[in-house]
Image: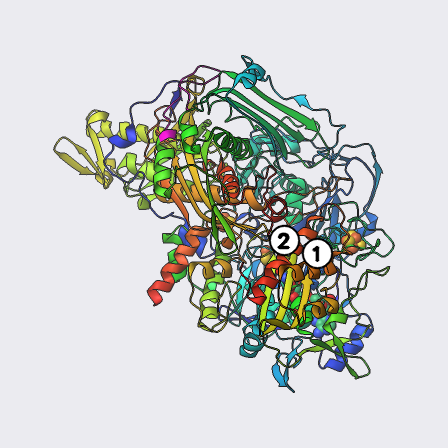
């Protein structure tokens, strides 16, 4: 029987704090650590199967048009080649997160450079890769395709109803201080270290896909839809995922192609994307152009707030980088304009990349806020403090727990923030201008439906099972801790099994909702187990205390293994977000403080110190939560200083589709990261009173760095990333 | 990767004959295999030279002879190199990573090919890869491209670091030809400008095998290698400068400058060295040197910044080398 | 063609195109060594050959006759972790785990390189014995990308091992 919890209201029960085990929140090591560090955790491409053959995708070399010739005979006689497949079931794009249905198929209709058009299958990888290169293809090219995001011919359209309140222009005219600035950010790639990889195996009835995916319950439907089979005929297996960051939310072309090939050839087929293909045919974060207009009174109180953004995507895609997501609720300002515009161009699909929206929206907003603080002449921390609204500025809804002020104050204290008047170019150490900057962090809190099964085994150990994934976020650790806390068990005796559609459908990992959503399903299942134990013990559930494998009721103490009498207790838990999502503006908050050096000659920027203070609701595991924040901050460094997709202006192909030229930060780019977790419980966040963790660390981080660059050197770079060439032009003469 | 025949060279002469007949040498493999996987290089025969006896560093007259199979790591760490040619150690250590330098060899490093984005994409026009097909970089993404000595057929840069230091040190490349003859090519003349044959990176002829690099007698002085890049490590140079400079009683007794990231070869102009020599250091002098370097510079849009960047960084290097304040 | 992997003799026969990385993963079943880019750009494939760290994706298996190859599996096992592996677990020096074997092999070799006095790009004095400061560790570990961003913890893990050695 399933126990269900539909969350319509804040959950004030605070069940976890009422428990006795005392493991929730503790900085425990990840249970899968020994496997990962010894190289024995098995990732998608690493399953050995008899007769496995290799497929390599063939991708388009034009922006738009049609494949007119795909000459199988050009490679048929190559050693080892088994088949060339260009099938209507194959997918030309990756599915958007949560799509639950197949993305665009029609692989022979080319809509972007890099689009998969065929799969070459051979006995070995080298044979397949070579044949994939040699395959003769001809196109009918559509010359008029728009590929350049700067092209004036792009007709931008409103993506959603804009928020227009009061009269922003008037507010700007009458304000004591204003800012009206336009910033740009470049496209990004998730660039998980594990490339997208799948091994498909078809037994005539069931298709098993070992794949690197984030959200199996959706991916299963997406794959089944593409193949035209029943979702029940699809089994997905992804116990370890080598990073996702949004790029593995939806089924991607290599998985579908592997499945099609396995069905057709009746042999297990492995397809691993080449690194260049991961860039060219999965997902990009759209480049953005953003205009921010702020109007403030003499004390720095905002009464006008405008944030407009222009982003792009492929025709037919329903996703637009939600740049303004945080701008809707973060700061005050009665006169508001928030407007997101989407333009259509023929570049690889734009989709979710870690913290879609806030990642780029917040860095720009926070840089603009720094410009405002300067215009007013007040401390940028103070400016933020003065603009924390009472209620949602457009919807009027209350905020759930919000510790922005604490984060700002405690972060500033921890960093040693100097609140005295600020001026650029005051501090010089040898060749380096040194300066500091800060920014607010915020990210909306998301929840998703989830199921999980908890088994309390008769020997007093437990198992948690869900098709939820652990993409590096610490799911194995925290689900074990939740169950351990609820059932009075050392998490070491709780086995967590994930990433297999044979288990109950979890929330999947994405939008920072995984821990709260699947965690709440585990909590609910544990409630059921507790009720069963109370019944066995003959006490009220409320009087039941579970600790260290024992049940206590009043003066009675009994070992769980005795109480269970050889019978396992199995409980399915279900969690679903209900009206709660509308009732509150729920978000995670924080503050960043950065110190940078800017080389006075070359314009190179080096981050010297970086502090982040974050409130994320209850912390489920302080170690993994800290790591998630750090990871986000590293992404912030990339977004601030090094990362940007470069597209060819003529055919829209990515010219830097690899790690040599798409620069993600390396170890030397990253100073010691100082993370402060600010204690919080958010009853509206989830029954765990926790909120999302995985993305907050990016949201605003790059703004703090940009502001520090300005404070150090006097150069306000309004186009991210802040590479040396852009800094150089504004530096003082030498 | 296209299938190929693999064999090992038993002797230098054997390697020479094989390459004359179209085989490719593989040393560390860190550049060749990268390109073979992309089928930018498609040799039918690959000759592994790693077991040849070319991995020694030895005294040679007053200078040093570095075998062509000496790895970048071994070269940078060698006590003599560190002691007498620190600019070489520094330049090598500024390139790639420990893992790559442990494999990369002295000969292979000299012959590494450009990192031009379009050269790396077999489906784009590129005169270097496919003579006569056109140059996609000219009106495309050219942020990393050349500002000196380019041609309308190719604006690529030579991406390496080590050779820039070698150019400043005025080292020689020792080359053995199929007839057994050994000749010496100054590093400064080893790489070519693209002209209308950008497919040729350097002056090696079919059958030539690099057997060593020889360094002249140590010159001492202050030696600096400065590299500007897009992240703190593991990135190619936007601009790099190797400087070997000696002061004597407040004047510049001798100077040698070489530049990376600016041209199809490590850029060296002896007029610059001469202009510095004998003068008292001053910003005016440094500006004049920069003018000499950059007056003929030509940029292509995205790489315009390299001109200003080079000027500024050159000033930093010369100030440091001459002991002026930063 | 004989070579030794983690102390065990192997005999490579096959397509000369096979990289050492693919040989380890697909033929020897040693999938601890990861493929992140296949082009020498990420370090996930780092293994030790005759004690030195290299990118196994940019070398051919046939080139390694008689070589001694050590992979992550040769350092320690899940039930008997090498001290570095254990330190990575304690310091959470990984998240998704995909770059991790490469990081650990790299750290192992780094410690030996420093002991041999090999300087790095950030070494101020080319002649002083190398001291593995945090900046030295960062530079020397920069050949191993980590998209999860575990760098700060990786440096802590390595530092702890160095301190226990001292
Ligand atoms: C991700 C990445 C980053 C890098 N970053 C940098 C950097 O920042 N700075 C830098 O300088 N380099 C960098 N490199 C390049 C690296 O230094 C070169 O790949 C390496 O030096 C090549 O040496 P190798 O021995 O591996 O050459 P191989 O790949 O074996 O050979 C390269 C070429 O040289 C030829 N060759 C080799 N030996 C001889 C010989 N004795 N005689 C004649 N021809 C010969 C080969 O036939 C081949 O054409 C980077 C490489 C990668 C993959
Ligand atoms: S610059 Fe040279 S290497 Fe680059 S595309 Fe043009 S011809 Fe090719
Ligand atoms: S897989 Fe070898 S360096 Fe990336
Ligand atoms: S742990 Fe995921 S890439 Fe490093």
Q: Which residues are magenta?
A: A388-405
Quadrant holding ligand 3?
bottom right
Residue furthest left as drawn: A555
Taking depth in this image into account, of B297 and C120 the one nearest to the observer is B297
Tell which subunit mark 2 falls on: A
- The chain to which mark 1 is attached is B
Query: To which residue does mark 1 refer?
Result: B115
Q: Quadrant of residue A610?
A: top left
Q: Secondary structure at mark 1?
A: loop
Crowding around mark 2 (Cα neighbors within 10 Å: few <14, some 14 to 19, many 20+) is some
Q: Position of residue A61 (x, y in %)?
A: 77, 43
Q: Position of residue A573 (x, y in %)?
A: 38, 28
Callout 2: SS: loop
Q: Which mark is residue B160?
A: none
**Viewer-nearest residue: A16 or A165:** A165
Q: Quadrant of the N terminus of chain A?
A: top left
Query: Splitting the image into 4 quarters, where does residue A262 fall?
Result: top right
Q: Position of residue B106 (x, y in %)?
A: 65, 72
> x, y percentage for residue A691?
40, 31
Verify CB contact (< 8 Å) between mark 2 and mark 1.
Answer: yes
Left or right: where A252 falls relative to A502: right
**Magenta: main secondary structure:** loop
Q: Is residue A17 left or right of residue A453?
A: left
Q: Is residue A458 a member of the stretch shown in magenta? A: no
Between C166 and A346, the residue placed more toward the observer is: C166
- Does any atom of ligand 1 lie closer than 8 Å to the CB of label 2? yes
For disc 1, the neighbor class at 10 Å (few under 14, some 14 to 19, many from 20) is some
The answer, for residue A252, to whether it is visible in the render is yes
């Amino acid at each position: 029987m399933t126990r269900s919890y539909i969350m319509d209201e804040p959950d004030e029960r605070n069940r976890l704090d009422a428990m006795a085990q005392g493991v929730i929140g503790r900085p425990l090591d990840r249970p899968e650590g020994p496997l990962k560090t010894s190289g024995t955790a098995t990732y998608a491409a690493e399953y050995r199967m008899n007769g496995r053959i290799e497929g390599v995708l063939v991708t388009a070399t034009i922006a738009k048009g049609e494949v007119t010739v795909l000459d199988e005979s050009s490679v048929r006689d190559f050693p080892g080649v088994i088949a060339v497949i260009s099938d209507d079931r194959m997918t030309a794009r990756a599915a958007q997160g949560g799509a639950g249905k197949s993305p665009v198929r029609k692989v022979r209709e080319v809509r972007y450079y890099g689009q998969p058009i065929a799969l070459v299958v051979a006995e070995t990888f080298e044979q397949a890769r070579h044949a994939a290169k040699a395959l003769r293809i001809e196109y009918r090219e559509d010359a008029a395709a728009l590929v350049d995001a700067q092209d004036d011919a792009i007709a931008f359209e409103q993506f959603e109803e804009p928020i227009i309140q009061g009269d922003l222009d008037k507010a700007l005219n009458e304000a004591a201080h204003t800012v009206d600035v336009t910033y740009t950010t470049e496209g990004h790639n998730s660039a998980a270290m594990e490339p997208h990889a799948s091994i498909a195996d078809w037994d005539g009835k069931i298709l098993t896909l070992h794949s690197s995916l984030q959200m199996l319950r959706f991916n299963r439907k997406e794959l089944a839809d593409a193949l035209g089979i029943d979702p029940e005929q699809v089994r997905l297996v992804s116990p370890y995922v080598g990073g996702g960051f949004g790029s593995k939310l939806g089924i991607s072309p290599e998985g579908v192609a592997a499945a099609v090939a396995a069905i057709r050839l009746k042999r297990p087929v492995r397809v691993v994307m080449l690194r260049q293909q991961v860039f060219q045919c999965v997902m990009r974060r759209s480049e953005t152009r953003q205009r921010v207009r702020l109007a403030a009174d003499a004390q720095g109180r905002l009464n006008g707030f405008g944030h407009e953004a222009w982003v792009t995507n492929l025709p037919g895609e329903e996703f637009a980088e939600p740049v303004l997501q945080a701008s809707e609720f973060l700061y005050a300002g009665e006169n508001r304009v928030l407007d997101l515009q989407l333009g259509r161009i023929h570049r690889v699909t734009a989709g979710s990349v870690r913290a879609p929206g806030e990642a780029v929206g917040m860095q720009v907003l926070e840089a603009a806020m720094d410009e405002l603080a300067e215009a007013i002449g007040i401390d940028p921390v103070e400016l933020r403090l003065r603009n924390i609204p009472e209620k949602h500025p457009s919807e009027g809804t209350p905020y759930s727990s919000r510790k922005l002020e604490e984060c700002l104050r405690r972060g500033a204290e921890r960093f040693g923030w100097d609140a005295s008047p600020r001026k650029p170019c005051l501090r010089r150490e040898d060749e380096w201008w040194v300066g500091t900057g800060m920014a607010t962090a915020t990210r909306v809190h998301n929840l998703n439906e989830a199921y999980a099964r908890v088994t309390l085994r008769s020997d007093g150990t437990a198992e948690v099972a869900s098709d939820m994934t652990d993409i590096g976020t610490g799911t194995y650790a925290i689900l074990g801790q939740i169950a351990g806390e609820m059932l009075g068990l050392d998490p070491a005796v709780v086995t967590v099994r994930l990433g297999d559609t044979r288990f109950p459908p979890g929330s999947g990992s994405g939008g920072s909702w995984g821990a709260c959503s699947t965690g709440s399903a585990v909590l609910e299942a544990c409630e059921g187990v507790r009720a069963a134990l109370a019944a066995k013990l003959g006490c009220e559930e409320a009087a039941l205390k579970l600790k260290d494998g024992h049940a206590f009721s009043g003066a009675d103490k009994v070992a769980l293994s005795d109480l269970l009498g050889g019978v396992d207790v199995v409980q399915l838990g279900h969690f679903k977000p209900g009206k709660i999502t509308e009732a509150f503006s729920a978000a995670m908050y924080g503050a960043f403080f950065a110190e940078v050096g800017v080389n006075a000659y070359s314009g190179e920027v080096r981050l010297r110190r970086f502090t982040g203070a974050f409130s994320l609701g209850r912390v489920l595991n302080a170690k993994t939560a800290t790591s998630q924040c750090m990871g986000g901050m590293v992404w912030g460094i990339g977004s601030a200083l090094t990362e940007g997709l470069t597209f060819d202006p003529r055919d829209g192909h990515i010219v830097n589709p690899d790690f040599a030229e798409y620069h993600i930060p390396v170890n030397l780019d990253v100073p010691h990261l100082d993370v402060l977790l600010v204690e919080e419980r958010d009853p509206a966040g989830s029954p765990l009173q926790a909120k999302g963790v995985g993305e907050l660390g990016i949201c605003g981080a790059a703004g703090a760095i940009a502001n520090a660059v300005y404070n150090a050197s006097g150069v306000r770079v309004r186009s991210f990333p802040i590479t040396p060439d852009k800094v150089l032009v504004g530096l003082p003469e030498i | 990767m296209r299938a190929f025949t693999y064999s090992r060279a038993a002797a230098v002469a054997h390697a020479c004959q094989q390459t004359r007949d179209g085989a490719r040498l593989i040393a560390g493999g860190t550049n060749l295999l990268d390109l073979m996987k992309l089928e930018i290089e498609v040799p039918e025969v690959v000759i592994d030279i790693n077991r040849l006896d070319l991995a020694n560093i030895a005294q040679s007259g007053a200078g040093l002879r570095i075998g062509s199979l000496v790895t970048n790591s071994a070269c940078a760490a060698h006590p003599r190199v560190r002691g007498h040619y620190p600019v070489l150690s520094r330049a090598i250590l500024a390139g790639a990573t420990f893992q790559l330098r442990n494999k990369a060899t002295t000969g292979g490093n000299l012959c590494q090919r450009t990192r031009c984005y379009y050269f790396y994409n077999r489906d784009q026009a590129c005169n270097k890869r496919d003579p006569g097909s056109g140059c996609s970089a000219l009106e495309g993404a050219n942020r990393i491209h050349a500002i000196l000595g380019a041609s309308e057929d190719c604006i690529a840069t030579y991406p390496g670091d080590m050779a820039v230091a070698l150019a400043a040190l005025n080292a020689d490349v020792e080359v053995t030809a199929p007839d057994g003859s050994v000749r010496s090519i100054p590093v400064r003349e080893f790489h070519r400008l693209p002209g209308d044959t950008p497919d040729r990176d350097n002056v090696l002829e079919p059958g030539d095998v690099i057997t060593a690099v020889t360094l002249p007698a140590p010159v001492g002085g202050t030696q600096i290698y400065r590299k500007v890049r897009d992240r703190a490590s593991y990135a190619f140079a936007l601009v790099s400068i190797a400087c070997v400079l000696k002061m004597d009683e407040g004047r510049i007794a001798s100077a040698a400058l070489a530049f990376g990231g600016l041209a199809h070869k490590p850029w060296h102009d002896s007029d610059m060295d001469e202009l510095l020599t004998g003068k008292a250091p001053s910003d005016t002098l440094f500006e004049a040197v920069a003018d000499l370097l950059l007056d003929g510079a030509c940029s292509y849009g995205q790489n315009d910044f390299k001109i200003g960047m080079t000027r500024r960084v050159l000033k930093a290097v010369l100030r440091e080398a001459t002991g002026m304040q930063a | 063609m004989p070579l030794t992997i983690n102390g065990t003799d192997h005999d490579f026969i096959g397509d000369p195109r096979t990289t050492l990385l693919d040989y380890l993963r697909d033929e020897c079943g040693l999938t601890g060594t990861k493929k992140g880019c296949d082009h020498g750009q990420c370090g996930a494939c780092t293994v030790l050959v005759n004690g030195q760290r290299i990118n196994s994706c940019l070398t051919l298996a046939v080139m390694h006759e008689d070589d001694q190859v050590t992979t992550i599996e040769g350092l320690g096992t899940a039930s008997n972790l090498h001290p570095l592996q254990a330190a990575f677990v304690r310091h959470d020096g990984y998240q998704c785990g995909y770059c991790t074997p490469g990081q650990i092999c790299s750290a192992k070799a780094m410690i030996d390189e420093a002991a041999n006095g090999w300087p790095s790009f950030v070494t101020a004095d080319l002649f002083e014995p190398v001291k593995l400061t945090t900046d030295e560790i960062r530079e020397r570990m920069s050949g191993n990308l980590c998209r999860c961003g575990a760098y700060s913890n990786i440096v802590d893990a390595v530092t702890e091992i160095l301190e226990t050695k001292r």
